[in-house]
Image (tube, helix red, strand yellow):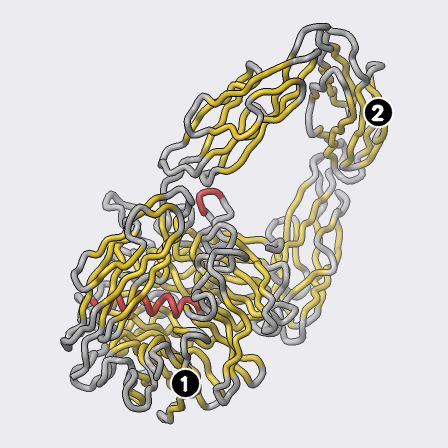
Amino acid sequence: MKTIRVFIAVMILVLAASWSAQAQTLTTLYSFCAITNSGFICSDGSTPSHLIHGTDGNFYGSTTSGGTNDLGTIFKLTPEGTLTTLHQFSGHLGVADGSVPLLSLESGGLFYGAAVGGGTNNHGTIFTITSAGTFTTLHEFSGTNGVADGSGPEVLLPSGSSFIGDTALGGTNNDGTIFTITPAGTLTTIHVFSGTNGVADGSLPVLTLANGASFIGSTFSGGTFNTGTVFQITAGGVFTTLHQFTGTDGSEPIVTAKNGANFIGTTAIGGSNGFGTAFEMTSSGTVTTFYQFSGTNGVMDGSSPGLEPITDSAGGFYGVTQDGGTNAAGLIFTLTTSGTLTPVYDFCSVSNCADGSAPDGFIASGGNLFGTTDEGGANGGGGTVYKLIPAGGIGGGGGCTFALNLTNASPSAAGGAATVSVITSNGCAWTAVSNDGFITVTGSSSGTGNGTVHYTVAANSSTNPVSGTMTIAGNTFTVTQAGAGACTFTLSATEASPTAAGGASTVGVTAAHGCAWTAASNDGFITITSGSSGSGNGTVHYTVAANSSTNPVTGTMTIAGNTFTVNQAGAAAPGVCTFTLTPTVEKVTVKGGKKSVSVKAKGTDCTWTAVSNDSFITITAGTNGTGNGRVSFTVPGNTNTTALVGTLTIAGESVTVTQAPGGCTFRLSPKSGKLLAKGGAKTVHVTPNLSDCAWTAVSNDGFITIISGGTNILGRGVVSYNLATNATSNILTGSMTIAGQPYTVIQKGAKP
């Protein structure tokens, strides 16, 4: 549900123009912004959000930008990662389909969604689209004119045979509305928000949960303390404010899950540390805060959190922060209501953030998590769709977990029939498919609950072994079949070069199951200590005796019919100093850090020195020494967009230091500023990708005053700014330039 919170910020910007540990496996299914023409247009879209798992087994979603017109797209993605763009949004031109879309649900073979902006009146639309891409506009919003039906629709939830949804703005007071809409497009406004006037019901609403015959939602701001509310509403319009946040218990709330009769939610900001909270609320509105987020300090849990209605096997709720984790690029975690947070996956863990950064929400399917990231990916930062297999599993909160009694099989060359058992909960459906022609599923290819998959393996007439897989209940089952007749053997290495001191080492043997082999030494200074014979894969352990001669020696072993050569160095001559450095090539990441090189000296009273030959390499310890030693050095973050290459000279030998290309990028949180007419102070948190990145902040409009954090900031920082009271009835829109990025500030006008 974090997607919805981010979507509110995007929506405000669009409308103003018209008025992220345990072991786990993550697979990037698709990277957006695959530029396909000379105009450098991300025709497939950029910044994906909110996936729906269609009844046809494919995933459907939207991008909030990019596409042919840079106004967003609707896409279909197979579980294997093949993407089809179903619709390119055009704003309010021609078909008036809208802009900045968000899919909400599938019903009756149609996908329903909302476009925040665009349409004939440029206040957004409600639309449907088929799996083949047939697009229909059901309703075009009018803002505050005429029927006052609202502006900036966001989310639809099923309500009987119709739907219930919200607009973040518009309506009589321009503070948002709740509406119902039929599948034919007949819309009825059932509640108009008043901000902080009258019942203090709040402003900028969003619906998130069904609760029996009622629906639970929250407001981004408004209420008595202007920090947001949680409310309940029926399809008939009966409205109740359940809780008004004060700031100390959080601000900008959203409710995303149920915990028995209670509700689970988060706040984007506020709390003890100002970075948001996680809370549990009773049906009567009593709120208990069970976790305070700390940003990217300390436990690196991030800020602006979001929890999903998905739990792990221990009952902790899965959640996400866009700037958390050790890489400050986003974090997936689990969080118990007793306040225990466990990291699950740190984004930007893959080189160049190919796994994505700034993750949004996710859904559960088949024991896996499928989600999107706003940024990162292999195509320059357009975002990704990913699949995560969490080590903690998925519990009853959001999906089924599946396990197999076996993960692999090794049949003989003759092949034959075999079975695999599926272990899962009652009611959990699964399928089994063969991914290779020599494996055939002979029984039922699907089931519900625990079951058995029957399969056969064809005879292998080749002398080589073959390997293939089946996908069973989302798990990979590997079949490795032996070859007929001759066996083949491969060594992990063909030679070794030990020092004069000798010592122990190993060689790996790779062979098919049942293929026997032997290992023998052909020279006296090489001794096999274990592994002189084996069958299938194995390891040969051996030792090399010390060489007291100044001359090198060469010997061999015969292992599984292959020759393995040992080239041993000679001992240093008396009175002569020789030095060995480890390593001689050091690779440093874009973030820089501490590195060291070990110096091994042979001889008596061997002295040495170490110097840096390039300014970006600083020696911190070991500038000179006698005998064995270590040289420590540091490399700062690479703020250049090109790779850096430099050298150290240590004991007369050269060590090459290479650093990956970098450059400074910055993340702003929140992504925009929203204030009421009375103005006041706000802050913006600036998080660079490197601690060595410098930045400044300037105001581009007179009604925005930067109080602190404006000049010569290095690394993370906070920009504080202030808005004077807006005495006019007009909405003021201005901007600051923070760390080279535009930051939009919107101030509401005074009410007449």
Q: Is residue 665 visible?
A: yes
Q: Is residue 85 above or below residue 139?
A: above
> Dividing the picture into quarters, in which one does residue 646 lie?
top left
Q: In this view, does 402 lie above or below 738?
A: below
Q: Is residue 180 visible?
A: no
Q: Position of residue 89 (x, y in %)?
A: 26, 63
Is residue 408 left or right of 330 when viewed as pictured?
right
Q: Where is residue 128 in the image (x, y as percent from the top left)?
A: 33, 73
Circle 1 crowding by C-alpha within 10 Å: few under 14, some 14–19, many from 20: many
Mark 2 → mark 1, Cα distance in angstroms: 75 Å
Q: Where is residue 503 in the image (x, y as percent from the top left)?
A: 78, 23
Is residue 48 left or right of 672 when viewed as pictured?
right
Q: Is residue 418 above or below residue 119?
A: above
Query: How many discs mark residues in the rendered view?
Result: 2
**The N terminus, quarter of image:** bottom left
Instruction: Give the residue pinned by disc 1.
Output: 231
User: What residue is drawn where x is 47% and y is 37%?
Assistant: 592
Amino acid at the residue labelled 2: Ile
Instruction: Give the residue pinned by disc 2.
Output: 528
Circle 2 crowding by C-alpha within 10 Å: few under 14, some 14–19, many from 20: some
Q: Position of residue 513 (x, y in %)?
A: 77, 40
Which numbered disc, 2 or 1, marks the residue that appears first in the sequence?
1
User: What residue is drawn where x is 44% and y is 72%?
Assistant: 267
Q: In this orientation, which residue lies closer to the viewer: 27 or 716?
A: 716
